Image (cartoon, grey):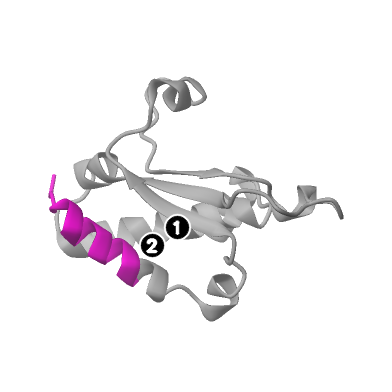
Amino acid sequence: MFTLSEEEFEEVVSKAIEDLPEEFKSKLDNVDVVVEDYPSAEIRRRFPPNRLILGLYQGVPHKRRTTGYGLVLPDKITLFKRNIEMVSSSREEIYARIRKTLLHEIGHHFSLSDRDLRRMGW
């Protein structure tokens, strides 16, 4: 387990977002990326009991948006700092896990299923 201060973790998150492919970044205009220490009990209940949740997408995926979609709160990608740190042994590994988690959750934003994402290596 490798830990960072909140400020250091936020810097790594910002770097990972900055390093995303431009075709993804340009389509994330109404998506907030936030950091929380751990998923809430409500979120944990939605997953198998022993699953370590590193991130979560909450919002309306692109395929489910209709012409009436507008004036809505931003979609949200939450990164769970303590869980990411728990499975990381260096700052570089934290960066890699954040990047992979962001890509995975962005995939959900673009309406990809977990099966699709696994097939793509995300």
At mark 1, the secondary structure is helix
Q: Nearer the viewer, residue 39 or 1?
A: 39
Residue at which label 2 appears: 99
Q: Residue at x 50, y 76 (%)?
A: 21
In the current view of this chain or complex, which residue is farthest to the front?
Answer: 71
Dot 1: within a 10 Å radius of its alpha carbon, few (fewer than 14), some, or many (20 or more) residues?
A: many
Residue at which label 1 appears: 102
Residue 119 shows in the view = no
Horizontal and vertical percent for residue 74?
Answer: 58, 52
At mark 2, the secondary structure is helix
Say if mark 1 contacts mark 2, CB within 8 Å. Answer: yes
Q: Residue at x 33, y 67 (%)?
A: 14
In the current view of this chain or complex, which residue is farthest to the right?
Answer: 67
| Main secondary structure type of the part rendered in magenta | helix
Horizontal and vertical percent for residue 121?
Answer: 51, 58
Left or right relative to 66: residue 93: left
| Magenta residues, start to end | 1-15
Left or right relative to 41: residue 11: left
Residue 12 shows in the view = yes
Image quadrant where one finds the N terminus: top left
Real-space Cα separation, disc 1 to disc 2, in angstroms: 5 Å
The kind of residue on which mark 2 rests is Arg
| Residue 9 drawn in magenta | yes
